[in-house]
Image (tube, rainbow, N blue to C red):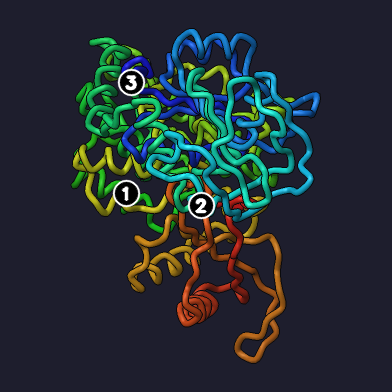
Amino acid sequence: MDSLAVKSNLVLILDFGSQYTHLITRRIRSLSVFSLCLSGTSSLKAITDLNPRVIILSGGPHSVHSPKAPCFPDGFVEYVESNGVFVLGICYGLQLIVQKLGGEVKIGEKQEYGRMEIEVERSSGLYGSKSIGDSQIVWMSHGDEAVKLPIGFEIVARSRQGSVAAVQNPERRFYGLQYHPEVTHSPQGMETLKNFLFDVCGVSADWKMEDILEEEIKIINNMVGPEDHVICALSGGVDSTVAATLVHKAIGDRLHCIFVDNGLLRYKERERVMGTFESDLHLPVTCYDSTEKFLTELKGVVDPEAKRKIIGKEFINTFDEFAKELEKKLGTKPTYLVQGTLYPDVIESCPPPGSGRNHSHTIKSHHNVGGLPKDMKLKLIEPLKLLFKDEVRALGKILNVPEPFLKRHPFPGPGLAVRVLGDVTEGNALETLRHVDEIFIESIKEAGIYDSIWQAFAVFLPIRSVGVQGDQRTHSHVVALRAVTSQDGMTADWYNFEHKFLDDVSRKICNSVRGVNRVVLDITSKPPSTIEWE
């Protein structure tokens, strides 16, 4: 997606490490306004090249007093003022504005964490028609506070404890909120964001999925020459399927899809997915059975990052092999590889500012971001890399991808390798996990709650527990069940099943899957956990 196509209304978020930064991006896009996220320590050129209309400085875990506190680049203030760019600082972002423009930030006498009531002290475009004295509940998370504002700034709202909650300097187009309007714990936060974007900044709500489709097709046609051929790695998931359908619409039969059975797929996944590709999507797909190759390379490997890297490398080796076969058949080498990389993949593979790392304090390497070898021969096409999952589903609907396919739960690129903790080749772990997972997912579907869950799956744990089955002592495997709700996969809450459902599923698993005598439930949100276990 070309940022230049939407730059006149682009809202750019500079990320200073807040766990909520992605939510700002999501909330703004939900208002039909295009937004992107960059590291807060990006170069001035990286910012100016995007030519944003609005810049939002996110929150973050740092104190502006820390010697290593992340900051916007030199020349930033001069750039935004000379180009008429509006700036909104949130939490740490507000404190950064205050400190860098000549005010003062100190450690607060009273820290403010969680729900807090604030009161409007001055009329402001931030609060629309709110009157002086009106109050609202917001979500605070700060230990420092602004105690002296830069010249020309004024306090708009205070907390009940007396701390500065909102500031502005309309003449210089600088605004600040000490709280987080993007989280649901600030009930009127979306209203404040709307006021800021539409009333204060004059942004237009004209970003539509149809425009994305049209723009992406143009980009693909400009990138791929009229004689070039393209390979697409289909996983059977929503992302790669929508990406393939989009590229196929752009270049037609010069797209050649490959579905790799790497031995790490779910129960009967190969048969089910190939059937959908052929009967419903009419995509040209070649199926490769590379089970032996992948599992041989994974034998004895227990480190999750190492598993991801190995799988990424083996995928590329398989794609290269497929490319050579195509070259013999077509008389020309395929040039590009399509992948269904999403925006959360990109964000999670980037470094938090102030971490001291140039690229990544890695949560996990995504096989389609951090797991690919540097010497890969094919050039990448990633048409979805600026979209969130729900946006991909909306795009897929426009492309007439079948609804049941679009509603499939996400499945990790490395497959069951990151759901078998430890060595995936040990014993009968993969087959055991497939059967457990199938029982769990089918039970969810039968209960009519599949569409209410973002992602559900089973995990094979590298431990055994003592049990009693058939009046005999057993020493068998333990499996975990995980189900979460989410909007975009960046944060998630565990799904609260009814006890009877859990009782039924546990009995089915222990009675049907040989070698399992204990079922546990993962009730951890993200954060602190990731959705997948590895």
Pointer 3: what residue?
Answer: 6
Q: In the image, which is nearer the foreground, mark 1 or mark 3? A: 3
- The answer to whether any part of residue 253 appears in the image is no
**Residue 135 circle label:** 2
Name the residue rendered at 40%, 28% in the picture: 200
Pointer 2 or 1: first along the chain: 2
Q: What residue is drawn where x is 47% and y is 82%? A: 500
- Dot 1 lies on which element? helix
The kind of secondary structure element at disc 3 is loop
Type of residue at label 1?
A: Val
Question: Upstream in the sequence, badge 2 or badge 3?
Answer: 3
Q: Earlier in the sequence, mark 1 or mark 3?
A: 3
Residue sitting nearer the eye, 44 or 185: 185
Between residue 137 and residue 216, name the one nearer to us.
137
Quadrant of residue 420 within the rendered picture: bottom right
Q: Amino acid at mark 2?
A: Ser
Check if mark 2's residue and mark 3's residue have beta carbons within 8 Å: no
Q: How far apart are the two marked residues, 1 and 3, measured between alpha carbons?
A: 36 Å
Determine the image quadrant of residue 222: top left
Q: Residue furthest bottom?
A: 471
Which residue is located at x 60 percent, y 89 percent? 470
Report x, y in % for residue 129.
38, 42
Whether residues under marks 1 and 3 lie with C-beta atoms below 8 angstroms apart, the answer is: no
Q: Is residue 384 above or below residue 183?
A: above
Residue 62 in view (yes/no)? yes
**Residue at image mark 1:** 273
